[in-house]
Image: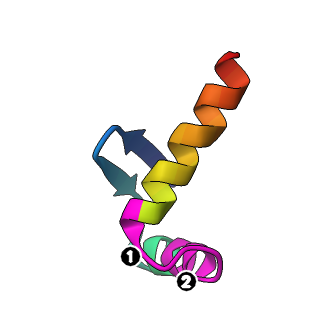
């Protein structure tokens, strides 16, 4: 399974059960996809610093 985080979206590539599983996993910590994308941006900014 691959997950690509873009500035305003995400792309998940994999089997349906893998994608559902990942979405359930991320739903535990983030209420919306937007929150998840913004969190990923923050992580990338910290790594880049």
Q: What residue would you read off at disc 2? A: 24
Look at the numbered disc 1 and give the secondary structure of its residue.
helix
From the image, state whether disc 1 or disc 2 is nearer to you.
2
Residue 28 is tagged as none
Pick the residue in front: 3 or 34.
34
Above or below, 22 relative to 43: below
Which residue is drawn at the image coordinates 55% and 72% (left, top)? Answer: 22
Residue 22 in magenta? Answer: yes
Above or below, 16 relative to 42: below
Above or below, 4 relative to 17: above
Looking at the picture, the colour scheme in use is rainbow
Look at the numbered disc 2 and give the secondary structure of its residue.
helix
Label 1 with label 2: CB-CB less than 8 Å = no
The answer for how far apart the CA atoms under marks 1 and 2 are is 12 Å
| Quadrant housing residue 14 | bottom left
Residue 16 is tagged as 1
Q: Residues within 10 Å of mark 2 (few under 14, many from 20)?
A: few
Does the rendering let one see residue 2? no
Above or below, 11 relative to 49: below
Which residue is drawn at the image coordinates 51% and 55% (left, top)? Answer: 1
Which residue is drawn at the image coordinates 38% and 56% (left, top)? Answer: 12
Q: Is residue 42 left or right of residue 6?
A: right
> Farthest residue toward the left?
8
- Sequence-wise, the earlier of marks 1 and 2 is 1
Residue 39 in magenta? Answer: no
Magenta stretch, residue numbers: 21-34
What predominant SS class does the magenta segment belong to? helix
Of the 4 image quadrants, the one containing the C terminus is top right
- Where's residue 8, x and y in %? 28, 46
Q: Residues within 10 Å of mark 1 (few under 14, many from 20)?
A: few
| Quadrant housing residue 25 | bottom right
């Amino acid at each position: 399974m691959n997950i690509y985080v873009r500035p305003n979206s995400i792309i998940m590539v994999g089997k349906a059960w893998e994608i559902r599983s990942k979405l359930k996993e991320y739903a535990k910590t983030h209420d919306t996809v937007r929150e998840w994308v913004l969190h990923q941006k923050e992580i990338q900014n910290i790594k880049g610093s």
